[in-house]
């Protein structure tokens, strides 16, 4: 049984001392493809380097909304022609820690924060359209604004994935535009009632698996560093909730992953 972790920050310094051991455990668990999404520009070259050192490792180019003030189109666009670059992102909107973000970005108001994040999000959407790559979308406490922007461009985008899907019903409307829903360790949390309720409403052909490693570690490893080898724990919970055999889910999710990220993600 082989699977892909469609969202794992393997460029994090938390893997510096044992990266190859993490990769070996993941391969042993059947995880053979990995997508490292861009977050901070300082880590992008490292993600690119890892993708060329290790078979099955890919990356995306972009910038996380929390670092929108650091957006540099020329820098991000410099990675799009790399054969291991499969997407643009993670990009989107994040209105969660407003005070912290205002301080980080040197802004004076929530409105200024929203304006900057929207501007940078739209710029990355336009880049994705220009280079015909899918989006990796980060949404936190900003569903309505994100939906409005995505619907504006949905018909000309090459699809995308709502990373760490937040279970907001209104975002399910994006499925018909080629968007997928990244499901990770949150599904195993005791307080994941909303996601458990919404999961059966997501079309099977729109589901993806992810970890967001090193964050959001699934039960029973909460509190530990997350890693791609924990994907089977999420799959197990998904199978239980949907009452669908794991083998069928694996086949469908692998098909979905290939549809989004291309032939390199074809698992025989």
Image: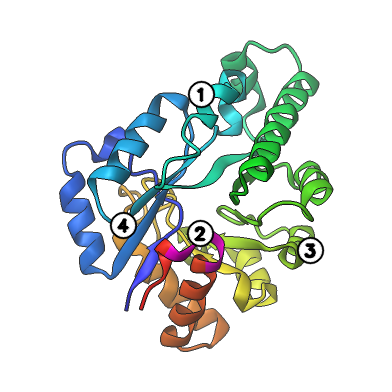
- Measured in 3D between alpha carbons, the distance from the residue under mark 4 to the one under mark 2, in whole angstroms, is 12 Å
In the image, residue 11 sits, relative to residue 165, either above or below, namely above
Say whether disc 1 or disc 3 marks the residue closer to the N-terminus. 1
* Crowd around label 3: few <14 · some 14–19 · many ≥20 (10 Å): few
Q: Secondary structure at mark 3?
A: helix
Q: Which residue is mark 1?
A: 75
In the image, residue 93 sits, relative to residue 157, either above or below, namely above
- Measured in 3D between alpha carbons, the distance from the residue under mark 2 to the one under mark 1, in whole angstroms, is 22 Å
Residue 191 visible in image: no
What secondary structure characterizes most of the magenta part?
Answer: helix
Say whether disc 2 or disc 3 marks the residue closer to the N-terminus. 3
Q: Which residue is mark 3?
A: 173
Say whether disc 3 or disc 4 marks the residue closer to the N-terminus. 4
The stretch of residues the image draws in magenta is 259-263
Q: Secondary structure at mark 1?
A: helix
Magenta-drawn stretch contains 92: no
> Answer yes or no: do the residues labelled 1 and 3 have beta carbons within 8 Å?
no
Give the image location of residue 163, x and y in percent: 56, 52
In the image, residue 155 sits, relative to residue 104, either above or below, namely below
Say whether disc 2 or disc 1 marks the residue closer to the N-terminus. 1
- Measured in 3D between alpha carbons, the distance from the residue under mark 3 to the one under mark 4, in whole angstroms, is 31 Å
Q: Secondary structure at mark 4?
A: loop
Q: Which residue is mark 2?
A: 261
């Amino acid at each position: 049984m082989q699977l892909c972790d469609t969202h794992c920050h393997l460029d994090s310094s938390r893997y510096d001392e044992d990266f190859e051991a993490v990769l070996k455990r993941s391969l042993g668990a059947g995880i053979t493809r990995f997508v490292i999404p861009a977050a901070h520009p300082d880590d992008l070259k490292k993600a690119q380097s890892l993708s060329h050192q290790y078979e099955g490792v890919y990356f995306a180019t972009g910038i996380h909304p929390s670092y929108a003030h650091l957006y540099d189109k020329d820098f991000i666009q410099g990675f799009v022609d790399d054969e291991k670059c499969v997407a643009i992102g993670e990009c989107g909107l994040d209105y969660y820690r407003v005070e912290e973000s205002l301080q980080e970005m040197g802004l004076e108001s929530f409105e200024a924060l929203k304006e900057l994040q929207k501007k940078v999000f739209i710029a990355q959407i336009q880049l994705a359209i220009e280079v015909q790559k899918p989006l990796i979308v980060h949404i936190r406490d900003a569903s309505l604004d994100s939906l409005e922007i995505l619907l504006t461009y949905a018909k000309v985008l090459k699809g995308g994935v709502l990373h760490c899907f937040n279970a907001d019903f209104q975002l399910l409307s994006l499925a018909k535009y080629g968007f997928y829903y990244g499901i990770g360790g949150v599904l195993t949390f005791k307080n994941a009632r909303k996601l458990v309720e919404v999961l059966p409403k997501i079309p099977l052909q729109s589901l993806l698996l992810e970890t967001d490693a090193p964050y959001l570690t699934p039960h029973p490893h909460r509190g530990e560093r997350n890693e791609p080898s924990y994907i089977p724990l999420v799959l197990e919970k998904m199978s239980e909730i949907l009452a669908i055999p794991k083998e069928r889910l694996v086949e469908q999710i692998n098909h979905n992953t290939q549809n989004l990220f291309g032939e390199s993600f074809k698992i025989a």
